[in-house]
């Protein structure tokens, strides 16, 4: 198939967020395991951070106010997600290990009243954070979190495997480890899709494989000729991948076959807004869970479900 022929596909506008985000600085944005979305924001002249949790299906939302004293940190907070029992997780991607062996705690768990319940050490160089409905925390790591920076050296590097599953007590449950000689280890985990409590997909530098992990075991993987792409949405044997290192977001609709090299490109896509304008790269861009993908501009929230075109 000619990858240069690009089909336009209009995304569904879910909500105009100009009123809710007005005057707030947005720090983190995520799609939760149940399809809801969550935001972490702050204002300089207000003495608290705000978590805003929105159910995009029925419009119900809730706010959690967190004292700035409970989120004091040298680096900014980059990730937010939900945990069972009305709890919320806030994570910073950077974490320092000092010369005396002490470390920063770059994870915080809060209740719905904004009370700090626990601090977690999740390691430096966190690319993405996703929780599942059982309350486990999946963390993917970029290159500095894998090879070391900010005082971290082997064997102390927490994210050296590139993908870690944690429990809500801050204990490791699983670390990614390729068992097939054809599959290289992670140098930089470009994307992670936590479909549910059983299945997780990843794609990483420098091999860019599509890897499916089921029940903490590598279920399958695909090595393909579409270099420099990473996973976005997944439904059955159909996968939506986004091209890396380009100015305009370009996506490939792919069909995965039974062989490890059997990846067929069905369509090349570019997404547009309700006015037919191409959706540009933004700070937060596209966030995915399973077949669902949400896209955040400065003030608008869009949604796409891979099921709608497969």
Image (tube, grey):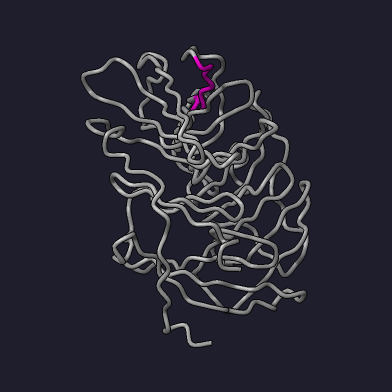
Left or right placement of residue 244 versus residue 214 in this view: left
Q: Which residue is more in the foreground, 263 or 164?
A: 263
Q: Residue at x 51, y 42 (%)?
A: 31
268 vs 58: above or below: below
Figure quadrant of the N terminus: bottom right
Q: Residue at x 76, y 51 (%)?
A: 214
Residue 65 location in percent, x, y?
A: 40, 17
Residue 55 location in percent, x, y?
A: 50, 35
Q: Which residue is more in the foreground, 100 or 216?
A: 216
Magenta stretch, overall SS: strand
Q: Which residue is more in the foreground, 117 or 127?
A: 117
Asked if residue 138 is among those painted magenta in the image, a careful observer would answer: no
Q: Residue at x 63, y 21 (%)?
A: 85
94 vs 6: above or below: above
Left or right placement of residue 135 versus residue 190 in this view: right
User: Total of numbered circles in the picture?
Assistant: 0
- Quadrant for residue 181, please give it: bottom right
- Quadrant for residue 19, please give it: top left
Looking at the rendering, the stretch of residues picked out in magenta corresponds to 105-112
Figure quadrant of the C terminus: bottom right
Q: Residue furthest bottom?
A: 2
């Amino acid at each position: 198939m000619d990858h240069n022929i690009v089909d336009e596909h209009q995304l569904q506008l879910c909500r105009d967020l100009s009123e809710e985000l007005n005057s707030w600085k947005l720090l983190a944005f995520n799609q939760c395991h149940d399809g809801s979305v969550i935001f972490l924001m702050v204002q300089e002249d207000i003495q608290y951070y705000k978590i805003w949790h929105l159910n995009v299906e029925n419009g119900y939302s809730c706010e959690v106010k967190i004292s700035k004293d409970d989120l004091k940190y040298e680096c900014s907070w980059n990730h937010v997600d939900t945990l069972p029992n009305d709890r919320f997780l806030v994570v910073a991607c950077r974490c320092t290990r000092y010369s005396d062996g002490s470390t920063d705690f770059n994870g915080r768990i809060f209740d719905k009243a904004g009370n700090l319940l626990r601090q977690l050490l999740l390691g430096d160089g966190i690319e993405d954070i996703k929780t599942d409905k059982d309350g486990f925390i999946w963390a993917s790591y970029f290159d500095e979190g894998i090879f070391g920076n900010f005082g971290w050296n082997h064997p102390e590097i927490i994210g050296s495997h590139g993908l870690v599953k944690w429990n809500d007590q801050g204990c490791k449950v699983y670390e990614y480890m390729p068992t097939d000689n054809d599959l290289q280890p992670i140098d930089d985990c470009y994307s992670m899709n936590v479909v549910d409590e059983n299945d997780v997909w990843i794609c990483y530098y420098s091999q860019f494989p599509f890897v499916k992990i089921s029940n903490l075991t590598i279920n399958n993987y695909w090595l393909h000729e579409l270099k420099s792409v990473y996973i976005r949405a997944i439904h059955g044997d159909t996968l939506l991948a986004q091209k890396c290192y380009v100015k305009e977001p370009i996506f490939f609709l792919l069909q995965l076959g039974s062989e490890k090299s059997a990846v067929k490109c069905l369509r090349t896509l570019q997404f547009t807004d309700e006015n037919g304008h191409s959706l540009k790269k933004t700070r937060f861009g596209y966030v995915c869970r399973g077949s669902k993908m949400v896209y955040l501009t400065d003030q608008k929230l869009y949604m796409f479900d891979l099921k709608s075109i497969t």
